[in-house]
Amino acid sequence: MQRYYIERTLQAIVTVVSVMSLAFFLIRLMPGNPADAYRAELIQNNPQLSQAEIDHRVERKLNVIPDAPLHEQYVNYVTGLLRGDLGESINEGVPVSEIIAEALPWTIFTMSIALLLSFAIGISLGALMAYKEGSSFDNGFSVLSILCNSIPNYVVGILLIWFLGHRFELFPTGGRHSTEMDRTVELLAPVETLAFLGDALWHAALLILSYAIVAAGGWALRMRGNSIQVLGEDYLRVARLRGLSERRIATRYVGRNAVLPLYTALLIAIGFALGGSVILEQVFTYPGVGYYMIEGLEARDYPLMMGVFLVMTVAVVIGVYVADLTYGLIDPRAQTRGGEH
């Protein structure tokens, strides 16, 4: 067991370092890399600057020494990362770590609600579809689930903005919260905190729905397939012969065994939800990490782009890592004799 944990930990570390290194070298080796582009911009806009001053500004912005060999730039960059220095945003003019620290809680807030909502709806609907396999209910919702899962979430988002945002004016179409609302999140001020959270949820409602509608279709189809497979197992016939109620069979045998394979997918989806926020946050003008990812791409803001990319990579790796370590604890069948995975 201990060896398994050590292997998975090393695997997670190697994955993060590999992705970070690949992204660093690919972007650096591209013609017209960010350092050259920023240097050219400084020379054009500030012809009075000396070469040393230009190099100093490039180093401060990009967290690399522009004239140093590539391997020295890489070591300098990794050293900065270990100190929590992601460089300074070229476009925003503030440290990237501050932008991410300010935007990440909002993305976690919206994506966690959307993911849990889609999961709850999906597994409930999928279980009902499996129990009514072959009925008009099953056929109708299977088609609906396939349709929902096939449409990109940003298309659903645009439709919701048009119908519920502009046509019926039920929800705001952008922003984190109302401008007149104070950001109050304190245990000693529950009324103000609830008012602020309610306002934030109201502003994020269409974004959350866009993600949840699409993702729920996928969860429903997976749950339906797992449940149908479990319903055909022999131990369910034995349970019925023992006189167990259908409700107990459905919750303790069918539901539990059908949901277990989705546990890993759910943890991995937590990481990928950050990546899924990129286009949605741009559509809804919602300043989370996905919004700043697009801003960085459009402005060729390399430090901001790399910082957000690293956060998304680490989130996916952590999701897979936690799934690997905990799946055996919730499903003993995943462990072999002796406690080894």
Image: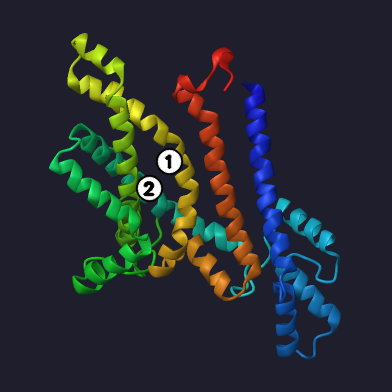
Q: Where is residue 231 in the image (x, y as percent from the top left)?
A: 27, 25
Helix, strand or loop at label 1? It is helix
Of the image marks 2 and 1, the number of the one nearer the N terminus: 2
Q: Where is residue 304 in the image (x, y as percent from the top left)?
A: 61, 66
Q: How many other residues sit within 10 Å of disc 1, few (<14), some (14-19) or many (≥20)?
A: some
Q: In which quarter of the image is residue 214?
A: bottom left
Cα gap from disc 2 to disc 1, whole angstroms: 8 Å
Q: In which quarter of the image is residue 301?
A: bottom right
Q: In which quarter of the image is the N terminus?
A: top right
Q: Quadrant of the C terminus?
A: top right
Q: Depth check: give the residue in front, 340 or 5.
A: 340
Checking the image for residue 179, the label placed there is none
Q: Is residue 40 left or right of residue 237?
A: right
Helix, strand or loop at label 2? It is helix
Q: Depth check: give the residue in front, 72 or 200.
A: 72
Task: Please name the residue shown 48% across and 43% down the image.
Answer: 268
Q: Depth check: give the residue in front, 220 or 35.
A: 220
Is the C-beta separation of discs 2 and 1 under 8 Å? yes
Q: In this view, does 332 lie to the left or right of 63?
A: left
Task: Please name the residue shown 75% across and 54% down the image.
Answer: 78
Q: How many other residues sit within 10 Å of disc 2, few (<14), some (14-19) or many (≥20)?
A: many
Task: Please name the residue shown 64% across and 74% down the image.
Answer: 90
Q: Position of residue 199 (x, y in %)?
A: 31, 60
Task: Please name the residue shown 39% across and 69% down the image.
Answer: 283
Amino acid found under the numbered disc labelled 1: Leu
- Residue under label 1, please give it: 266
Q: Position of residue 254 (x, y in %)?
A: 29, 25
Q: In this view, does 167 lie above or below 50?
A: above
Q: Is residue 101 above or below residue 321?
A: below
- Residue under label 2, please give it: 115
Amino acid found under the numbered disc labelled 2: Leu
Q: Is residue 89 left or right of residue 25?
A: left
